[in-house]
Image (spheres, helix red, strand yellow):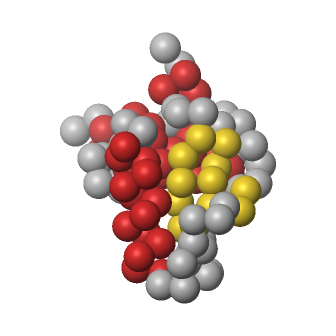
């Protein structure tokens, strides 16, 4: 199974700049706005995390979706296997240890 097949059809995340909840579709080059956002940045983060968890989406998958959208879907950043359970990117030298 390739990295792209390990990604969900879509996931939710929050924009760093505004805290707004957005949806990322697998393979898309931009995000979609949603009607899920509140004025509270922290609440938006929790809403996005709970929605992803309810759909069985891991933090690694969420970060890989964000990486794919921002850097390209064929890049290592779009591979959920390159992230730890907390959603932190793992460098190649760390994988090989």
In this picture, residue 13 sits left or right of residue 25: left
* Percent coordinates x, y for residue 82 in the rendering: 41, 40
Q: Residue at 42% x, 39% y: name it.
A: 55
Which quadrant of the view contains residue 83? top left
The residue lying at 57 percent from left, 72 percent from top is: 37
Question: x%, y% of residue 8?
Answer: 53, 33
Nearer to the camera, 71 or 42: 42
Q: Residue at x 64, y 49 (%)?
A: 24
Quarter that holds the C terminus: top left
Most foreground residue, 65 or 38: 38
Query: In the displayed structure, would residue 35 be above or below residue 71?
Result: below
Q: Is residue 26 above or below residue 59?
A: above
Residue 90 in view of the camera = no
Please name whichever residue, 23 or 67, is drawn nearer the observer in this view of the structure.
Answer: 23
Q: In the image as oriented, which residue stretches furthest toward the top?
A: 1
Toward the right, the furthest residue is 29
Q: Position of residue 5 (x, y in %)?
A: 55, 22
Number of callouts: 0
**Which residue is depicted at the point 35% across and 46% down?**
53
Q: Where is residue 6 drawn, in percent x and y?
A: 48, 26
- In the image, 15: left or right of 87? right
Q: Nearer the viewer, residue 48 or 79?
A: 48
- Report whether residue 29 is seen: yes
Left or right relative to 87: residue 61: right
Q: Going by the picture, which residue comes out furthest to the left?
A: 97
């Amino acid at each position: 199974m390739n990295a792209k097949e390990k990604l969900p059809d879509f996931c939710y995340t929050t924009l760093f700049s505004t805290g707004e909840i957005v949806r990322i579709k697998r393979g898309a080059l931009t995000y979609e706005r949603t009607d899920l956002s509140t004025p509270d940045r922290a609440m938006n983060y929790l809403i996005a995390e709970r929605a992803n968890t309810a759909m069985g989406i891991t933090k690694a998958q969420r970060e890989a979706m964000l990486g794919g959208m921002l850097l390209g879907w064929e890049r290592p950043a779009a591979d959920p296997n390159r992230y730890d359970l907390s959603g932190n990117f793992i460098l190649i030298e760390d994988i090989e240890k």
